[in-house]
């Protein structure tokens, strides 16, 4: 119907706007696991690969700015395991965006934060996986034992 068409078109506009943000060479994280990193606001990219957050905590440091924004541009997919995303120093999960070329898989015991916009699908694979944010995908969002909150 018209409402669904409008919602899908808005998703595509947001997805394309996130993909168009410039990512400088210093923020290209190809081949680097995210667990254990602390990142300042900015655009981070994995141009043709998967973002790996299979273990550890990715800490997003707002530097005292509650309006700080993080954009993760991921060429193929996001994969998580027993990991988490933490916000410190004013960072807000509503300002975290994961623009994923294909699919995101949020694994068991993952505490994920931010807004996932996936080119195909998002799958929450097990118990104790959670998302504080939004899960938006062109094809499907599949949840098994997951908790999602705004």
Image (cartoon, rainbow, N blue to C red):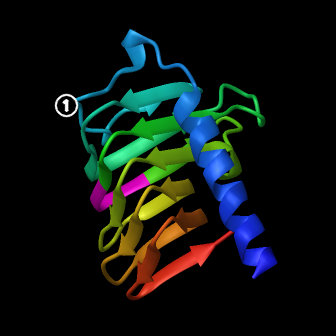
Magenta segment includes 65: no
Quarter of the image for residue 48 reads: top left
Return the residue found at the far left.
31
Looking at the image, residue 23 lies above or below residue 111: above
User: What secondary structure predominates along the stretch shown in magenta?
Assistant: strand
Residue at left offset 67%, top offset 47%? 13
Q: Nearer the viewer, residue 80 or 105?
A: 105
Range shown magenta = 79-84
Instruction: Indicate the position of residue 126 as horizontal and vertical percent values.
Output: 31, 81
Return the residue found at the far top.
25
Q: Secondary structure at mark 1?
A: loop
Is 65 situated left or right of 131 in this image? Answer: right
Looking at the image, residue 19 lies above or below residue 112: above
Quarter of the image where the N terminus is located: bottom right
From the image, tell me which residue sits under label 1: 31
Looking at the image, residue 123 lies above or below residue 117: below
Residue at left offset 40%, top offset 67%? 121
């Amino acid at each position: 119907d018209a409402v669904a068409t409008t919602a899908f078109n808005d998703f595509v506009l947001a997805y394309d706007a996130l993909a168009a943000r410039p990512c400088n060479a210093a923020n290209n994280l190809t081949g680097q696991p995210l667990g254990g990193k602390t990142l300042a606001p900015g655009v981070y990219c994995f141009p043709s690969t998967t973002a790996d957050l299979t273990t550890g905590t990715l800490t997003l440091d707002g530097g005292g700015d509650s309006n700080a924004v993080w954009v993760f541009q991921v060429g193929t997919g996001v994969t998580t395991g027993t990991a988490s995303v933490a916000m410190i120093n004013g960072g807000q999960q509503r300002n975290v965006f994961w623009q994923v070329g294909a699919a995101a898989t949020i694994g068991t015991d993952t505490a994920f934060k931010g807004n996932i916009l996936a080119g195909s699908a998002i799958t929450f694979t097990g118990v104790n996986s959670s998302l504080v944010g939004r899960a938006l995908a062109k094809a499907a969002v599949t949840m098994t034992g997951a908790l999602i909150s705004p």
